[in-house]
Image (spheres, rainbow, N blue to C red):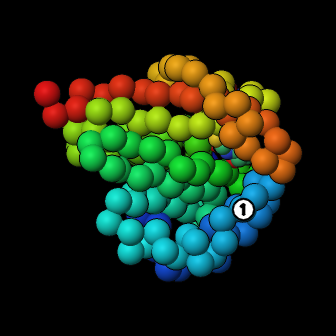
Amino acid sequence: MSVKIIIEPLAERHLAQAAQLERECFSDPWSLEGLRAELTNPNARFLAAVSGEAMAGYLGLHAVCGEGYIANLAVAPAFRRQGVARALLRAGAEIAEKEKLEFLSLEVRTSNLPARRLYESEGYVHIGARPGFYTNPREDGEIYTKRFGGSL
Ligand SMILES: CC(C)(COP(=O)(O)OP(=O)(O)OC[C@H]1O[C@@H](n2cnc3c(N)ncnc32)[C@H](O)[C@@H]1OP(=O)(O)O)[C@@H](O)C(=O)NCCC(=O)NCCS
């Protein structure tokens, strides 16, 4: 990790930058209101990676019935290739272990090789595809899952 970041729960003060990051990173970005709704969602475990006043990145995770789903992961262009996404994923994995989730699962665009390399290097296993999962542009989604012990 070559940049100093703090990882903390996503809060109201992060929302404007998180929405900006969504617009920079995705063709179908979450709105600020959509992100705000997660602050009161009992299933949401959203994390912000903060560097000084700047949001370097964030991770959105939902924990539902003992299973974890990563809804979004984004790192600001100026902070990329410095280990921010890996740190966020590891913080998500700590949550999975602490809450005894069975697994963390996510979808990623087939063409998103940087993200796929990241997930593979963090122990996520490719378990299948969802044809046409994404729009704008239409593309298949690849499903990756990392198993944790669960509560057994
Ligand atoms: C994918 C993304 C989250 C990676 O964030 P990051 O902070 O730059 O990633 P890290 O620095 O933690 O990289 C960890 C590993 O991921 C892989 N990786 C990351 N970016 C890569 C790239 N551009 N090309 C190839 N591999 C890459 C590498 O294996 C890297 O390890 P290394 O730097 O030791 O080689 C970031 O590029 C991003 O926000 N992209 C746009 C949004 C997005 O695609 N989100 C994922 C949606 S599923």
Instruction: Identify the residue at image location x=64%, y=31%.
Output: 130
Looking at the rendering, in which quadrant would you find the N terminus? top right
Whether residue 65 can be seen here: yes
Q: Is residue 44 left or right of residue 34?
A: left
* SS type, badge 1: loop
Q: In this figure, which residue is indicated by the disc labeled 1?
A: 29
Farthest residue toward the right? 137
Q: Is residue 74 above or below residue 122?
A: below
Q: Is residue 108 left or right of residue 40?
A: right
Instruction: Identify the residue at image location x=85%, y=45%.
Output: 137
Residue 140 screen position, x and y as percent: 73, 32
Residue 126 screen position, x and y as percent: 56, 20
Q: Is residue 145 left or right of residue 22?
A: left
Residue 91 found in image quarter: top left
Residue 28 found in image quarter: bottom right
Q: Quadrant of ligand 1?
A: top right
